[in-house]
Image (tube, coloured by chain):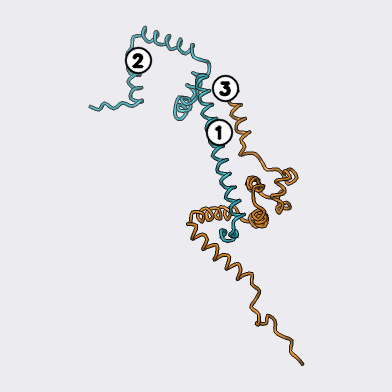
Amino acid sequence: MNTELNTDKIAQLLNRSTQQLDTRIVSALNLARNNALNNQRAYAPAYAHAHSHGTARWTHWLMPHSTQQWIAGGLLVAAIIGGANFWHHAQEQQISELDVAILTDELPIEVFVD
Amino acid sequence: MRNSLIAVFLLLCLTNPANASAGSWRELTPAQQEALAPLSQQWDSLPELQRNRLLETAKHYPRLTHEKKQRFQSRLTAWSKLTPEQRKAAREKFHAFSKVPAEHRERVKQMVKQNQAIAAQPPASGIPTTTPATQP
């Protein structure tokens, strides 16, 4: 028996099951869904509905949803920018030290230039 | 909250010291102008990256000996005329050469000095460089 299920198969199963549900259960589920949606922020269902497929799911998942997540993301970005700056500065310093060494060495620069 | 965080990130990006631009010749400090004096004429036309690197290099100038200061200034113009690729290759060669054992480095230096001495010598005497005028 093939037990592999993907999201499409699950969706099909759920659709078939809902068609077989009692009307009262369907209306109760509808009511619960509407209540849940009403408790969400205004942008959330619109965003989720508008981008329910493809890469938008990932961007939605990656987007911070709380202040703590925003702060953590901010700190991460700040750390990345700071690290990149430090690395760039260290590299430029190394280059300038080499340049001074070449310009002041006993050997003329022609020796090192093609 | 989000907006303020985004503003902080943008500020961080804008205040990135790597983005600091080198000014015109007149905007340089007297110490920078002294170190980079041979480039005073072409400074304003040099690419920004090169100017930034030269300014970094000029920071070392005050600590150099008199002899090294002279070498630095005499080579600066030739150095600035090289292409970025040539300068990069020169740095790589110099770095590789600095890893060579001191004994070998000294030998190379002696060879270069000998070649320079030969090149600096005037043409051998006894060989006329121009044909003498013929008597009528």
Q: Residue furthest right?
A: B136
- Quadrant the N terminus of chain B occupies: top right
Q: Of discs 1 and 3, which sits in the foreground?
A: 1
Residue occupying image coordinates x 60% and y 23%: B4
Q: Are marks 2 and 3 in contact (CB under 8 Å)?
A: no
Q: Which chain is orange?
A: B
x, y (%) of residue A24? 37, 7
**Which disc, if any, is residue A82?**
1
Whole-angstrom CA distance, mark 2 to mark 1, is: 53 Å
As drawn, B107 above or below A100: below
Residue occupying image coordinates x 45% and y 12%: A36
Q: Residue furthest bottom?
A: B136
Q: Which residue lies under the disc numbered 3?
A: B2
Task: Residue type at mark 3: give it.
Answer: Arg
Q: Chain of mark 3?
A: B
Q: Which residue lies under the disc numbered 2?
A: A18
**Which disc, if any, is residue A40?**
none
Q: Residue furthest left?
A: A1
- Count of residue discs: 3
As drawn, B83 above or below B21: below
Are discs 2 and 1 located on one and the same chain? Answer: yes
Task: Residue type at mark 2: give it.
Answer: Thr
Whole-angstrom CA distance, mark 2 to mark 3, is: 40 Å
* B135 on left or right of B5: right
Q: Colour of chain A?
A: cyan
* B104 on left or right of B52: left
Give SS at disc 1: helix
x, y (%) of residue B45? 70, 50
